[in-house]
């Protein structure tokens, strides 16, 4: 399955940090900010999550829901949410099926090893379920503000 701006975003079913099951289609009628991140409670991922937290009301004012996705477990997500008081759901993608569908499961290279992992990415999905914007290989600084401005200027 390929992903393309202007086309329907791939639907999925994942477990939340609370053990509930959600589908992307459950959020029909809302804008969705679907962000993929490598690992709970690491420096860059914590900064990004806290930026989404600090702007949560601004997203809500634009009728947008924030959903974070990583391969971490439900228990890991619970601890991350509690520690940083995150007001949005984190979704469990342990088998990285959704990351693969969105093209964020990539070969990563460090000087001493190569491994597969999440490439930090964000997808803005409109109220009808169509992909409107993709941010790939995201740099954390200023990213949440960019996503918020995109929704404000294009989807509100």
Image (cartoon, grey):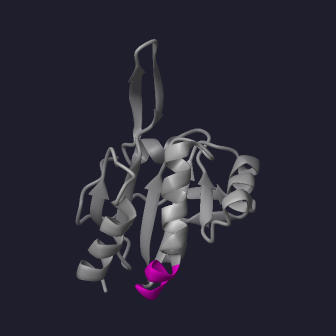
Residue 21 as seen in the image, left or right of residue 53:
right
**Rendering coords of residue 42 (x, y %):** 58, 42
Residue 21 quadrant: bottom right
**Rendering coords of residue 143 (x, y %):** 35, 59
Residue 63 quadrant: bottom left
Image position of 91 with respect to 117: above or below: below
User: Can residue 30 be seen?
Assistant: no
Quarter of the picture holding the C terminus: bottom left
Residue at (68% x, 66% y) in the render: 85
Magenta span includes 6? no
Residue at (72% x, 64% y) in the render: 20
Task: Name the residue nearer the viewer: 3 or 39.
Answer: 39
Residue 125 as seen in the image, left or right of residue 7:
right
Residue 37 as seen in the image, left or right of residue 19:
left
Number of numbered callouts drawn: 0
User: Can residue 6 be seen?
Assistant: yes
Residue at the top extreme of this rendering = 112
**Rendering coords of residue 84 (x, y %):** 66, 60
**What is the chief secondary structure element of the magenta stretch?**
helix
Residue 68 as seen in the image, left or right of residue 106:
right
Magenta span includes 61? yes
**Rendering coords of residue 103 (x, y %):** 36, 43
Q: Which residues are magenta?
A: 57-62
Residue at (49% x, 66% y) in the render: 52
Residue at (24% x, 80% y) in the render: 153
Task: Name the residue nearer the viewer: 125 or 2.
Answer: 125
């Amino acid at each position: 399955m390929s992903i393309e701006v202007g086309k329907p975003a791939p639907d999925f079913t994942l477990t939340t940090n609370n053990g509930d099951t959600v589908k992307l289609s459950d959020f029909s009628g809302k804008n969705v900010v679907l962000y993929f991140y490598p690992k709970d409670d690491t420096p860059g991922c914590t900064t990004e999550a806290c930026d989404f937290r600090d702007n949560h009301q601004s997203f809500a004012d634009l009728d947008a829901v924030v959903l974070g996705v990583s391969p971490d477990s439900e228990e890991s997500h619970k601890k991350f949410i509690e520690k940083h008081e995150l007001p949005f759901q984190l979704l469990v993608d342990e088998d990285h099926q959704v990351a693969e569908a969105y093209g964020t499961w990539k070969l990563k290279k460090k000087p001493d090893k190569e491994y597969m992992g999440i490439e930090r990415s964000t997808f803005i999905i409109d109220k009808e379920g169509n992909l409107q914007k993709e941010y790939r290989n995201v740099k954390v600084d200023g990213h949440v503000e960019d996503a918020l401005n995109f929704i404000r200027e294009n989807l509100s």
